[in-house]
Amino acid sequence: MRKGRGFIIFASIVIALALLFSLDVLLDSLRFSQVFSHIYHDPIHVVGGMDVYVNGTLYKENLAPGQWRYDGPYDFSDTVIFTVDLATFPYCTDPTLCFRSRSSEVHVYQGSRLIYSLESTGGQNPAAYNGGRYNLVELDPQAMDEDLTLVFETSYITSAPLFDPVFFANRTTLVTGIVARNMPSLLIGMSMVSTALLIAFLSLTLSNRRIRSNLMSAVFLIALTGIWILMQNWSRQLFISNVSIAQDVSYLMMALLPGSMLQYIMKNYDMDMQYMRRIFVPLADLFLVLYVLMYVPFLFMGVPLDGMLSVISIGLLLYFIALLVFCLLQYLRSGFSGGVPLMAGIAAYMCAIALEQTLLSLESPLRLQLAIYLPYYIALFIFLFRATGEAMRNSHSSGEKRRIMEMSFTDPLTGLLNRNALDNRLERISRERRDNIYIFMIDVDGMKSYNDDFGHKAGDDLLIAMAESIREATVALNRYIFRYGGDEFLLMVEEAGALDTDAVVQRIRENFRRLMDRANADFSVGVVRYDISMRKDIMARLNEADARMYYDKRGEHRKGMSTPPRRK
């Protein structure tokens, strides 16, 4: 299976699984939300008047409603307790509490009875809740004259303990208020994933591998972004039993974003990729390494993630800023096609990441959520539009375009690439600084005398046999074959590792003699290797191959063929 087809199948499987997760989230959200009109059906009471105890000692009395941070001395074994008299709460038929817990175990008591517990067992891993896990606690309506006690075991805290407001209302009001408000974010992520899935499946029906590659580079970027958004919001939902899995996937998508962005740029933009490969590709790999280094200690040793996740989030923003500056410098230097839309897309994407990481929370109103995700849509539309345009430009499905290309770059006798194609290839090699290229200059022996003795029709058959011999002998290699002129042929092989050039020449020679049905059918050849570390350019090495070929021809003193060969 070709590498390109394997990548497409892998990407399609990932996107399909993400869509299944998305549907599950949507169905659960609708099931729990019931009716959206209930969001403001009843007032939501913010609990105040709590007394705060730290490690058994009263620290603060009659705490004001809202978010509160403990600024006193603490260590990883601190216990923070909030107590309040339930008799001060407004009347509710179905009294329920809702509060966020950040990286801590939680126990809730109504009077002396334990009515809720969030412990570090199974999928309920508080160490994964650094972004804020929502807890929904139903109270006993017959015991509203007792005290309420919230116990936070802050053994996973790595920064000053932060405690969010505690809300109180009827259960339906709280659930619909939280889940339904979060629905736009879930739908936005799901729309991205489903769009990517649709385009991916459409791409599989295309016969042109280059078109599929262009489209899939943009599709994969869109899918990763959508999965990232879904998992971030899914991990904060009330009904998720295993928050850590959703959050793990969320940060994995974040670690894959730099690499997917680079893949998209390299597939769809014609710019100097030398520094892109030397600087940005290793940095993208570093994000994956950091992800592994971060999660291995977390999964097996319980090491908290708060600080590391902040570093990776900031690093992601810095990465995109550096990428934007690099593209700007490349555009000012060479003015590559599509440079302005690319920079606009990267800037919008960077803006969306910054807004999402700093402003978005579960209580964000609909307008704010749409404003945060709008730059994502702008960026992804630009990327997809460019990939589609580039795919259409590279398409050979049009018969007229194919005929023009064949006339411009194909030798009509042998079907090989011609000198126009060679000039185009050499310019691309020089511009992209391609590395490790083997150059074979091949000349048929005795061609002039053969034409004089047997006519040009037989000479044409000889050239066709030479072309077919090279083509058959190198079919497994990444090669380009050109008719250089007359009876000369140029073979260029691009291989990352070492190539046994003698074996390649021997296969061509055996094929040539078999096709011509003569043991003395032969050719002269000169072979050189080119890489970007050499001081000489590609043209200088090509001339050296030509000189070596003539040296081989003079050294062998071949006399040519005295009788016309019979082609099989």
Image: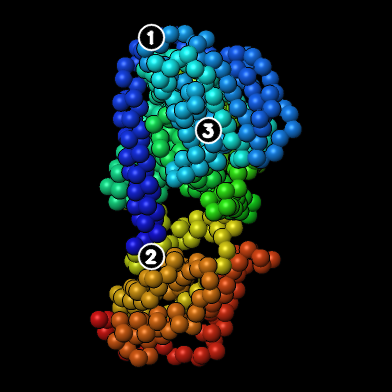
Identity of the residue drawn at 74% across and 33% down = 73
Q: Residue 541, labelled with which disc? A: none
Instruction: Determine whether label 1 and label 2 are within 8 Å by CB.
Output: no
Mark sitting on residue 416: 2
> Left or right: where does residue 481 sit relative to residue 207?
right
Secondary-structure class at tag 2 = loop
Q: Which residue in the protein does label 1 denote?
A: 41
Name the residue at 43% across, 17% down. 143
Q: Earlier in the sequence, mark 1 or mark 2?
A: 1
- Mark 1 or mark 2, whichever is nearer to me: 1
Residue type beneath disc 3: Val
Q: Position of residue 454 (x, y in %)?
A: 31, 82
* Residue 436 visible (yes or no): yes
Residue 189 on image: x %, y %: 41, 32
First along the sequence among labels 3 and 2: 3
Q: 164 or 221, which lies in front?
A: 164
> Nearest the camera: 426 or 348?
348
- Pointer 1 local density, CA inside 10 Å: few below 14, some 14–19, many at least 20: some
Q: Earlier in the sequence, mark 3 or mark 1?
A: 1
Is residue 454 rendered to the left or right of residue 286? left
Please say if 567 is above or below 30: below
Q: Nearer the viewer, residue 416 or 238?
A: 238
Locate residue 519: give its quadrant: bottom left
Q: Which residue is mark 3?
A: 106
Instruction: Give the answer, above or below, for where 63 lies relative to 241.
Output: above
Element class at badge 1: loop
| Amino acid beneath label 1 | His
The image position of residue 445, as x and y in percent, is 44, 83
Q: What is the C-alpha distance between the residues marked 3 and 2?
A: 73 Å
